[in-house]
Amino acid sequence: RGDDKIGQQTQTAKTDGQDKPSFLVRSATARSAWIEDTQSPGLLREVNIGDTIPDLGKVQKIEREGSGWIVVGKDFVLR
């Protein structure tokens, strides 16, 4: 289909000066994304717009950025 894109960047979200969990966006479409917690390699989690990622917050949007995808919340951006 051409909607999927493999990601290769890890994002550590920071809120109030404290490190939050690090995730890698492994694949995505405009409606959902597969993210990998770098503390549990190989364990993928599907997230959709409106879902809450523990310790990070609610997913507000999933969109293309350059040749990859980003997952955006109020206080985080995962690449």
Image: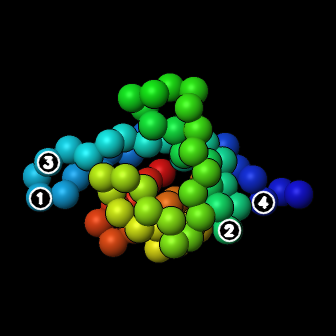
Dot 4 falls on a residue whose secondary structure is: loop
**Image quarter of residue 21:** top left
Q: Earlier in the sequence, mark 3 or mark 2?
A: 3
Contact (Cβ within 8 Å) of mark 4 with mark 1 = no
Contact (Cβ within 8 Å) of mark 2 with mark 1 = no
Contact (Cβ within 8 Å) of mark 3 with mark 1 = yes
Q: Residue 9: in sight, yes or no?
A: no
Would residue 25 appear left or right of 54 to someone viewing this image? right
Would residue 17 appear left or right of 1 to someone viewing this image? left
Q: Earlier in the sequence, mark 4 or mark 3?
A: 4
- Residue density around tag 1, few if under 14, some if 14–19, many if 20 or more, within 10 Å: few
Distance from label 3 to label 2 (Cα)? 30 Å
**Number of marks in picture:** 4
Query: Could you tell me residue 50's position as x and y percent?
Result: 51, 72
Question: Compared with residue 19, is residue 74 higher up or lower down, i.e. above or below?
Answer: below
The disc placed on residue 31 is none
Q: Earlier in the sequence, mark 4 or mark 1?
A: 4
Q: Which callout, 4 or 1, points to the residue nearer the camera?
A: 1
| Residue carrying label 1 | 16
Contact (Cβ within 8 Å) of mark 2 with mark 4 = yes
| Residue carrying label 2 | 30
Residue beneath the point at 56% across and 70% down: 49
Depth check: give the residue in front, 19 or 55.
55
| Residue carrying label 3 | 18
The quadrant in which the N terminus is found is: bottom right
| Residue carrying label 4 | 3
The amino acid at mark 4 is: Asp
Q: Earlier in the sequence, mark 2 or mark 1?
A: 1
Residue beneath the point at 30% across and 52% down: 55
Dot 1 falls on a residue whose secondary structure is: loop
